[in-house]
Amino acid sequence: MAAAAKGMMPTVMANKGVLAKAGVGALSGILEGNMARRATNLEADQMAQRAKSAFAKGTVGAAEQRRQASVTMSNARAAQAASGGVTTDAQAISQLAGIDQVGEYNAMSALYGAKTEQQSLQRAELMKRYKDKTARTAKMFEGLGTVVSSYMDNSDPKPKPRPVPMIKPTVSYAHGSNT
């Protein structure tokens, strides 16, 4: 029994060394994945910030378009009054309404463009986070595969069968006769 245990000892020790080496490899893969996750999260956070900034820029642009339309309408009223015209007749009101309509269209276009850019950046952020999550999962399975593969490659290719204990049959003499 002691000789069998001594014969197994080098194999067990070799397997422990292989497992330790594979474990270090797997751990380095996990650490690499964590560093990549931090970098990806930083990039995704920057994309989220750019998305907010894009929408804010569009809101400011829309306000500027409305302000310009208001200035243009004021200048048009001043020009109508300076020429001796009336600013309340149908044609004057129609011209002012057209100026207001163009100004509002420009403001809505600025908001739409900003919202579209914001949504595009948000989708890119989500995809980056999803890609990172799947890459981390793949790294985890890769590390696990490395450990299992290293163990299987360095384990005894033909394990020695354990001896099966033999049970000696007992002879039973039923009714006292052997025939």
Image (cartoon, helix red, strand yellow):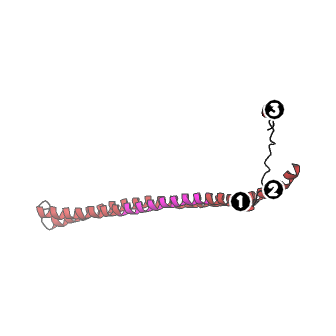
Give the label, 3 or 1, closer to the camera: 3
Q: Badges 2 and 1: C-beta atoms under 8 Å apart?
A: no
Whichever of callouts 2 and 3 sits on the residue coming sooner in the sequence is: 2
Disc 1 secondary structure class: helix
Whichever of callouts 2 and 1 sits on the residue coming sooner in the sequence is: 2
Q: The residue under label 1 is which amino acid type? A: Met
Give the label, 2 or 3, closer to the camera: 3
- Asked whether residue 41 appears in the rendered view, the answer is no
Disc 3 secondary structure class: helix
Disc 2 secondary structure class: helix
Nearer the observer, 19 or 100: 19
**Residue 114 percent across, percent down from the top left:** 38, 62
Whole-Å distance between the Cαs marked 3 and 1?
57 Å
Whole-Å distance between the Cαs marked 2 and 1?
14 Å
Nearer the observer, 113 or 98: 113
**Residue 50 percent across, percent down from the top left:** 46, 61
Helix, strand or loop for the magenta stretch, by majority: helix
- Mark 3 crowdedness (10 Å alpha carbons): few <14, some 14-19, many ≥20: few
- Mark 2 crowdedness (10 Å alpha carbons): few <14, some 14-19, many ≥20: few
Q: The residue under label 3 is which amino acid type? A: Gly
Residue on which disc 2 sits:
13
The residue drawn where x is 34% and y is 63% is: 110
Whole-Å distance between the Cαs marked 2 and 3?
58 Å
Residue 176: numbered disc: 3
Residue 152: numbered disc: 1
